[in-house]
Amino acid sequence: MPVYNQEIYRKEKHWKEGEFDVYRNMQWTGPGCHEGCGCLFYVKDGKLDHIEGDPNDEFSRGRLCMRCLNMVDEAVNNPTRLGHPLKRAGERGENKWEQISWDEAYDMIEEHVRKAWETQGPEAIVALEGTGRNVVWQVPLLEYSAFKSPNYGCGFLSGDSCYLPRCSASVGVLGGPSVVDCGQYDARRYDSPEYEYPEVILQWGCNAIMTNADGFLGHWIIDCMRQGGTKLITVDPRITWMAAHSEYHIQVRPGTDAAVAMAMLHVMIEEDLVDHEFIDKWCFGYEDLVEAMKDATPEWAAEIAGVTAEEIVGAARMYATAKPAAFHWGLSTDMTPNGVGQAHAFMVMQAITGNVDVPGGNYLATGPFGVDALYGCGYDYFIDDELKKKRIGVEKYPLHKFGAAACLVGDELLLQIEAGEPYEIQVMYLAGTNPIVNMAAEAPRVYKAMMKVPFIVVADLWMTPTCTAMADLVLPIAMSCERDSYREWWTPSRAITKITQYEECKSDEEIIVDLSLRLNPDGVPWHDVESLLNWVLEKDNAPMNWTQLKDQMYAYDFKGYRRYETGKLRPDGQPGFNTMTGKLELRSTLLEAMGYHDLPFFEEPPESPVTRPDLFEEYPLVLTTGKRHWEFFHSEHRNMPTMREFRDQPEVEIHPADAEKLGIEDGDWVWIENQRGRCREVARVTPIIKEGVVCADHGWSFPEKEAAVPVLQGVFDVNINNLTTQGVVGETGYGAPYRCLLCKIYKCTPENSQVTPSDLVFGTKA
Ligand SMILES: Nc1nc2c(c(=O)[nH]1)N[C@H]1C(S)=C(S)[C@@H](COP(=O)(O)OP(=O)(O)OC[C@H]3O[C@@H](n4cnc5c(=O)[nH]c(N)nc54)[C@H](O)[C@@H]3O)O[C@H]1N2
Ligand SMILES: Nc1nc2c(c(=O)[nH]1)N[C@H]1C(S)=C(S)[C@@H](COP(=O)(O)OP(=O)(O)OC[C@H]3O[C@@H](n4cnc5c(=O)[nH]c(N)nc54)[C@H](O)[C@@H]3O)O[C@H]1N2
Ligand SMILES: [Mo]
């Protein structure tokens, strides 16, 4: 670690610098992202003035992204943010609001919750959240402790298609998720004598430098390349920066990844590039794997994926012979019904090459002190077993009980709301999710269903289209520097400390305390945010309380490498992996016990040129959706002028050869359409996308447009989730086709734009 000027970059938590109070602290939503980066917060007269990256933070090392750097003026000090609880004054969608006090807001919630308890039972209360911002453990804890309901889940993310397919599969195979080792588990980072740089990082369906997803910062890969000479392999239908810097770039047809992965396994096995010592000693089911991969030849996969057999063979050899090699898997793994089968192949690749839990390989990641065993959703001490059985959809899809997050199945919740059977959902609490703009597949259908729920509370930073369309009560939420909190995503554990206050905003943590003390005063062991955070840390077996963590800011808990040898992976302290057999299960007995594929497998997407040649005739392009951009985090940041200056409109990437055939030019507004619906985006004609494939943005709305229905910030006109599906999931219930559909594209004209998708949703035109 370089030594910084200690006068400027000091290590204490707080100091004075001229007219500023400077605080070292973590930034971790809102506004949103997956990370907690170390920042210096410069405060003047109680108001945040500017921030800088903190070079003394081992995690982010002083680097910040454009969204964080822009956050002060356009988020924290933005006068259009929510500052007071608002009660709906007109009809839903009219955007008429009455400012009320927190007491009145809580009275409303209490009345509806008690009514649900009395008329149906707590299960009629549902709490939904979005991705892992710093509203992750908070929402289930509120749901369990205050509402006493087991029904917590994601905001209609079909197939729970983000991280959960990967992580749930990993519970059966490795005993938990694995993450590329860039030294992040050890506070000494690259300077640790034990650390080795990966010789190769294989990046699969992941764009780490843009996304910094899941507690992993993309620039660590650049660190490895610069400091350790790490080489890259990339599997992606688009030429990303990473792909352009790779030795092999395998440009797959979306949704065919498992075939390519199986062929790579086939090559490794056939050419005997595997680590027999590790397999013999620590793995279960190798013979079955060999048998199952026998026919998965590179030629077979190349034909399916639209790549060459040579690149599959070359990439397989390069990964398998590198020591160590690391495997970085992205969201595209999850966004297909084949997600679990694909994830299984990826884990097996890490295993048979001997790259699990070794320096510079794939580290088996848990929270520092055990919290994330259930991905932060394990605090269900308040719910008895009978109630747990009432979690919607988990009897049908039991992997949800064992998986990485014990939550309800969103696709099944949708069916239940639509049918009103077996009972009606009476109360919905949304925090950190904006479903009809972004998370929900088949958004128009989800919108109509949600409108049937009699009482909806949205806790957010802004008046989003979801608030306007359906909220009965909107709660104003504190941003990161306005909250005391505790958060980790793998490592390190972090304390987030309150520095400023905005209007009447409350943090998600304060709301848990207030509502649980109102609704379940005898059932909860806390009385304020500090005692709540102490309780959470205690449940996580942390060796310190909140006040101590706050002082030291973060805590590492590195337990060394090859923990299968030292007994540190299993609760019983025995060597081995935390799986049913105690071995790394190349063939998963957990998946077998549930009647699922127990070995890696490939299935064509449900709507592909191969499975649906009939549809392909009318919709001749393969559609993948939702690649990320620097400027936005999902639906967020569209209201920030600087971000819009960089990127003003939703775009769909299309290859020049396809564009030419369709008479489409760069910059044209086009309709993207399939049998479920359409939306419009701007064509970006570019050779970086595979021919025959288009990639459309997600998460768009135009905050500058009219908020009230039927405009609703234009959200349904540009919503790529008009084209996605609900209920088309993998056998386990995990994985849905957000990234492997079919569509057609044509230029927008006045004639073909007379009836818009919004008109169809709101019935404004026949
Ligand atoms: N700036 C920013 N960062 C984010 C987010 C954000 O909205 N904005 N969202 C966060 C969230 S919740 C998540 S889950 C992560 C996602 O993080 P990543 O997985 O890293 O990112 P994506 O950009 O969604 O997708 C990665 C790549 O998948 C490729 N791809 C598309 N379809 C396929 C396919 O079928 N197969 C393969 N192999 N590749 C395919 C795309 O071309 C893209 O380059 O990012 C997180 N970080
Ligand atoms: N077609 C398509 N759809 C996708 C994707 C895709 O790739 N393609 N990606 C999917 C994925 S991977 C994911 S994870 C989902 C993400 O979906 P979500 O995580 O639901 O993201 P948003 O819709 O942006 O909603 C987040 C809301 O939380 C608010 N917020 C931010 N910070 C806080 C906070 O601290 N507290 C509270 N209470 N609110 C806060 C924001 O203002 C915003 O309104 O989207 C999914 N949708
Ligand atoms: Mo996600």
Image: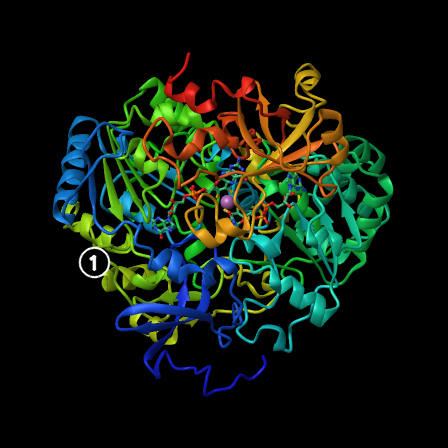
Is residue 374 in sight in this rendering?
yes
Disc 1 is placed on an element classified as loop
**Residue beneath disc 1:** 526
The amino acid marked with disc number 1 is Trp
Between 30 and 130, the one nearer to me in the picture: 30
User: What colouring does the structure picture have?
Assistant: rainbow
Which residue occupies 38% across, 29% down? 711
Disc 1 CB within 8 Å of nearest ligand 2 atom: no
The single residue placed furthest to the front in the displayed view is 750
Give the left or right position of residue 54, taking residue 450 as reference: right
Please, is residue 726 above or below residue 532 in the view? above
Is residue 632 in sight in this rendering?
no
The single residue placed furthest to the bottom in the displayed view is 7
Between 573 and 448, the one nearer to me in the picture: 448
Picture quadrant of ligand 2: top left
The single residue placed furthest to the top in the displayed view is 766
Between 78 and 395, the one nearer to me in the picture: 78
Which residue occupies 22% across, 35% down? 96
Please, is residue 746 above or below residue 244 in the view? above
What crowding class fits label 1: few (fewer than 14 Cα within 10 Å), some (14-19), or many (20 or more)? some
Percent across and percent down for residue 84 are 21, 49
Question: Dividing the image into 4 quarters, which one contains the N terminus?
Answer: bottom right
Percent across and percent down for residue 455 are 23, 31
Percent across and percent down for residue 324 are 73, 63
Percent across and percent down for residue 426 are 24, 29
Give the left or right position of residue 604, taking residue 101 as reference: right
Which residue occupies 17% across, 46% down? 520
Question: Dividing the image into 4 quarters, which one contains the C terminus?
Answer: top left
How many marks overall? 1
Please, is residue 273 above or below residue 300 in the view? below
Please, is residue 554 above or below residue 487 in the view? below
Which residue occupies 21% across, 58% down? 526
